[in-house]
Image (cartoon, rainbow, N blue to C red):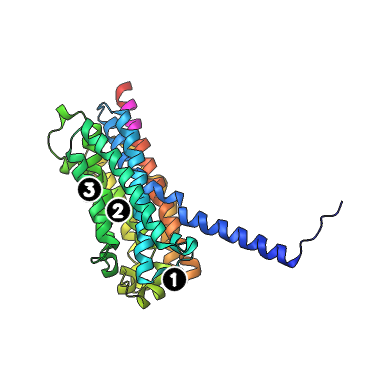
Amino acid sequence: MLPVPMSESQVVVSLHTSNHQSLWKAAVKWPMYTVALMPILIVVGWLNSQRIAIRIDQVLEFILAAVLLLAWENLTNDVFDADTGVDIHGKPHSLVNITGSRNMIALVSNGVLILGLTIVIIMAYKSSFQVLWLILACCGLGYLYQGPPFRLAYHGLGEPLCWLAFGPFATSAALMALIPVSELSKIPWSSAFEISSGPALATTLVLFCSHFHQVEEDSIYGKHSPIVQLGSAKASTLIPWFVALTFAFEWWPILTGAWPLTGLLSILGLPTGITLIRLLRDHHNDPERTVNSKFLALRFQALNGFGLVFGLSAGAFFTIGQ
């Protein structure tokens, strides 16, 4: 039996529905939540490598809180970008653009923030209230990134804020939440910097690459991202440095014997990193091609981070077996 052809109106409705679903999928951006999970997972891997007991309940609570707080950050970014107008043409998948209601998205974001911080308070009560202050510092950095009157992302300072939030601050909080209070009385900044510097740089690369395809829109609306300030050609030459320094920070503790050799599994991200370098080297000024650079950077971040987590954890088993 031959299929019945759709009428022109049915085709339009079908295309509209498909496009609407694609916009929602892009707006939710589930793959981006690997950046929220990485600080806690890296800490779990490191604690395994050191054969330090882990509080599983705190791990699960930290993961849930991290996802909720990143959701708050994404929602508020849409709200604040709607206020400046930068997302009107360049970001059709903004939740404000999709729903047509800035106030509703703002209300949801505040609710998500309260829920996330409630979980953090519970974690802090069971470990140390310094966990709460560290997570509040992460939230503060997130607000400085996009919130008025600061909007530091509009001055090209988003990347340093990203590195600090997903690096030493979130990692210190994870360490204090997972290690028994009796074993850790003060914020472990030194360990946090050692553990997080590489993975946080990979996370920062995701943010850096997200600007390449919207240079024109950003410059029109006064968002002076690093790509706008440097130009896409010069900015693309920094990508190899991001990749190389990520591995340098991660492999130095391995070379000095502080971490197990199996941590070299972070090299799983290298092929994607090379692909990203080549893409932006050859097509840095082509928005249709560079729109994928953020997702390549995200794949590099995930493969590199998960490789490091599994490598550090595996090192404990090899040590025990010797």
| Most foreground residue, 154 or 314 | 154
Lower sequence index among marks 1 and 2: 1
Q: CA distance from mark 3 to mark 1?
A: 31 Å
Q: Residue at x 82, y 57 (%)?
A: 4
In what element is the residue under mark 1?
Answer: helix
In the rendered view, does 304 fall on the left or right side of 125? right
User: Which label belongs to residue 136?
Assistant: 3
Question: Mark 2, residues whose alpha carbon is within 10 Å: few (<14), some, or many (≥20)?
Answer: many
Q: Tell which residue pokes out farthest to the right in this image.
A: 1
Q: Is residue 197 visible?
A: no
The three-letter amino acid code for the residue at tag 2 is: Leu
The three-letter amino acid code for the residue at tag 3 is: Leu
The residue labelled by disc 1 is 88
Instruction: Where is residue 123? Give x, y as percent.
Output: 26, 35
Q: Is residue 314 magenta?
A: yes
Q: Tell which residue pokes out farthest to the top in this image.
A: 321
Figure quadrant of the C terminus? top left
Q: Residue at x 29, y 30 (%)?
A: 48
The residue labelled by disc 2 is 201
Q: Which residues are magenta?
A: 313-318
Q: Where is residue 213, by image quadrant?
A: bottom left
In what element is the residue under mark 3?
Answer: helix
Q: Residue at x 28, y 45 (%)?
A: 250
